[in-house]
């Protein structure tokens, strides 16, 4: 039986785990299944390897990058300055962070009430944590998996808040998605251009996971439901550690 640690409920409506993060279906040349490979508990050092080429595809739920490592997911992290959003006619929600098959760590922008509401949102097989957040804060979102623990964390570098959702259960994911996600139909909330930086998986910059390595893949994702581009993703920086997500249109 899994054990939840430091888990706290809040009276904030939360998003369901996105389909792409729940099943991590194949997108383009990237397949990030909930595979039977247990994640290693080793603590690798960051690689300075240059960014490799990423294939590109459209996604109905995600924008950003998907990274695959068939030997297992040990860690994933992204740093984000929470963008200011605008609802307009939207009642949809967006999640900004890192996502895997057994959990995610994100900052959510919801327009369910007609006005932007920001929350920290962490989920593992334990109960989720949802707590109030604010735009403009710089936040580190993180996932960790070992043969014994699945853990989601968020560190707000601006106000010092720190949340952890941890489950005593084996992690078996083989990759992660770095970026933003929405399960809701258009229109989605508009938001300022957002830079995702310090992107790492298993201690390597995500640019390391090019499609030229056996057992590894990197896929660039643009949010394009129903043939309309809602969010576009830039190329990775030269060192493979950052990209920019740009809101394109709401209809």
Image (spheres, helix red, strand yellow):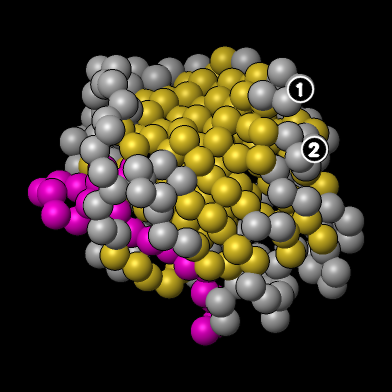
Residue at image location 67% in from the left, 26% down from the top: 156
Q: Which mark is on residue 134? A: 2
Q: Can residue 23 be seen in this view?
A: no
Image quarter for residue 9?
A: top right
42 in relation to 46, above or below: above
108 left or right of 2? right
Residue 186 percent coordinates (x, y): 68, 74
Residue at image location 35% in from the left, 43% down from the top: 239
Residue 124 percent coordinates (x, y): 51, 32
Secondary structure category for the residue under label 1: loop
Secondary structure category for the residue under label 2: loop
217 inside magenta stretch: yes
Q: What's the distance in space between the residues labelled 1 and 2, CA to CA?
A: 10 Å
Nearest the viewer among 32 and 96 is: 96
Q: What stretch is highlighted in magenta?
A: 206-227
Image quarter for residue 202?
A: top left
42 in relation to 96, above or below: above
The crowd level at tag 1 (other Cα within 10 Å; few <14, some 14-19, many 20+) is few
180 in relation to 185, above or below: above
Residue 117 percent coordinates (x, y): 82, 47
Residue pointed to by mark 1: 159
Q: Can residue 224 be seen in this view?
A: yes
* Disc with the residue nearer the chain's start (1 vs 2): 2
Which quarter of the image is occupied by the N terminus?
top left
């Amino acid at each position: 039986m899994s054990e939840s640690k430091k888990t706290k409920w809040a009276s904030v409506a939360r998003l369901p785990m996105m389909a792409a993060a729940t099943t991590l279906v194949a997108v383009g040349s990237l397949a990030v299944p909930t595979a039977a490979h247990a994640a290693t508990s080793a603590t690798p050092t960051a690689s300075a390897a240059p960014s490799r080429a990423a294939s590109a595809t459209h996604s109905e739920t995600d924008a950003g990058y998907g990274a695959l490592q068939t030997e297992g997911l040990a860690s994933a992290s992204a740093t984000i300055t929470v963008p200011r959003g605008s609802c307009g006619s939207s009642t949809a929600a967006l999640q900004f962070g890192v996502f895997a098959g057994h959990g995610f760590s994100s900052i959510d922008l919801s327009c369910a009430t007609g006005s932007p509401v920001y929350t920290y949102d962490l989920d593992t097989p334990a109960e989720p944590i949802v707590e109030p957040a604010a735009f403009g804060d710089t936040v580190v979102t993180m996932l960790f998996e070992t043969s014994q623990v699945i853990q989601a964390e968020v560190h707000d570098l601006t106000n010092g808040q720190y949340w952890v959702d941890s489950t005593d259960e084996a992690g078996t994911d083989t990759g992660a998605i770095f970026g933003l996600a929405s399960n809701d139909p258009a229109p989605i909330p508009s938001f300022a251009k957002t830079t995702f930086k310090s992107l790492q998986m298993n201690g390597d910059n995500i640019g390391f996971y090019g499609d030229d390595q056996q057992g590894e893949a990197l896929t660039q994702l643009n949010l394009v439901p129903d043939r309309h581009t809602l969010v576009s993703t830039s190329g990775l920086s030269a060192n493979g550690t950052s990209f920019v997500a740009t809101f394109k249109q709401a209809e």
